[in-house]
Image (spheres, rainbow, N blue to C red):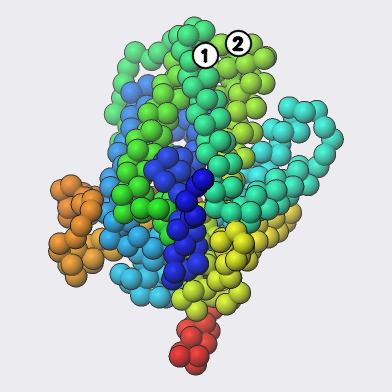
Amino acid sequence: MTDAPKIDAATGLARKLGLFDATMIVMGGIIGSGIFVNPAEVARHVATPSLIVGAWLIGGAVALIGALVYAELAARRPEVGGQYAYIRDAWGPVPAFLYGWGLLLVIQSGGMAAVAITFARYATELTGTALPEAGLAVAALAALTAINCMGVRSGSNVQSFLMLLKIAAIAMLVGAGFLFAPAAPMPRTAPAEPLGLLAALTPVMFAYGGWQTASFVAGEMRDPRRDLARGLLLGVAGVILLYAAVAFVCVHALGPEGLASSATPASDVMRVALGPRGAQLIALGIAISALGFLSQSMLTAPRVYFAMAEDRLFFERVATVSPRTRVPTVAILLQGAVAIVIALSGAYGQILSYVVSVDFIFFGLTGAALIVFRRRQPESEGFRVPLHPWSTLLFVAACWIIVAATVASHPVNSLIGFGILALGIPACLYWRRKQKAGA
């Protein structure tokens, strides 16, 4: 006989998730299909093996510092909505609303639509079916929406299972590439490439993004102060090992020049190692990885819209919790619907290009929130960031350097992203007026 799940009296959500769930959610939020492609993008900016692998280690170090910051924030603010709640409590409702607005219209939904199409593309190639890609993408999004409406445990179990399959796919790529692919010739010279390394960090940091989404489900963790902090650190450390291993094996099998010229580096590595069957195997792994990312996104992001609605800064019905499954079903349906609309519109590619500059603004604001909380309450229980404030300031500076680099390299896309964000200001003011009128 099992104990009844603990229900949070303030939100009505069921606290069912533990450390393993938190770790799998962190890793699932980071690892999508990008790691199977982005090593080539890095190699186009830096041409030496040490810098190609080093870029992933540097990016991982920044992500790990960020995870340390978020671990303390989780200990101080173990609330549903996570990053939204941190920004709200440090900087006020308007920046927090704009984060949720950007998440729904740009950051999360655009990424989900693009990854859903990626899944559909590989799935149709593997099965040889003539189904339209958009239709299969919609079916995947709809199925995951339904699964997550069945309960947080249902959604987490599917996400954890897919995450384990992702780890297996990456282990297969690394093992086959290292054991069966002959070593490619390496360049003898190693010129300094500081500007190239800085440019390479943009796709690297994009690939490392997503670990913060685990904070969204803090309100459904049994012990968020302990498990979310530990899950962030374990999850990010695990991804650093996987990403560095993938970058290493891509350089080993293809060489810097071959990697830079590859459109599908993971498939090329497996083709060199195991022939055409190897390419098919990794295509299956990429499809599973894409589906796992979608599952994690559907599990986590709706909790932000739920928190916004609870603050009466969004449609009231979005704060509805199912009395049977104890999950925010309307928020989950909203996330699924927006991602489906973007997938059908074909605009996901453009929207995805707006993500980095917008997302890392809020990363920086969230890191700076810890400085605000430390000043308000110097002492606190639970995890504390080592070497604060210097480590926290390093993370904030890294985030805003990435924003500046992205704006410099993609000014038009960045401005469009900022414009979509600015459209949220009148929407926020509208709900703020409704909030005050109803007070």
> For the residue marked with disc 1, what is the amino acid?
Ala
Residue at horizontal 17 percent and vertical 53 percent from the top: 388
Circle 2/circle 1 CB separation < 8 Å: yes
Q: Which residue is mark 2?
A: 274
Hey, which residue is sitting farthest front in the picture? 1
Label 1 sits on a secondary structure element that is: helix
What residue is disc 1 on? 176
Query: Residue 125 location, x and y as percent?
Result: 75, 29
Which of the pair 275/76 is nearer the observer? 76
Is 157 displayed left or right of 79 in the figure? Answer: right
**In front of the other: 285 or 253:** 285
Residue drawn at 42 percent across, 46 percent down: 18
- Near mark 1 (Cα within 10 A), the count class, few <14, some 14-19 or many ≥20, is many
For the C terminus, give its image quadrant: bottom left
Q: Residue furthest bottom?
A: 437
- In the rendered image, residue 336, in percent from the top left (x then y), is placed at 65, 57
The vertical placement of 276 against 4, above or below, is above
User: Percent x, y for residue 355?
Assistant: 50, 54
Crowdedness near tag 2: few (<14), some (14–19) or many (≥20) residues, C-alpha within 10 Å: some
- Residue 350 seen from this side: no
Disc nearer the start of the sequence (2/1): 1
**Position of 357 compared to 172: left or right?**
left
Residue 169 vs residue 61, the one in the foreground: 169
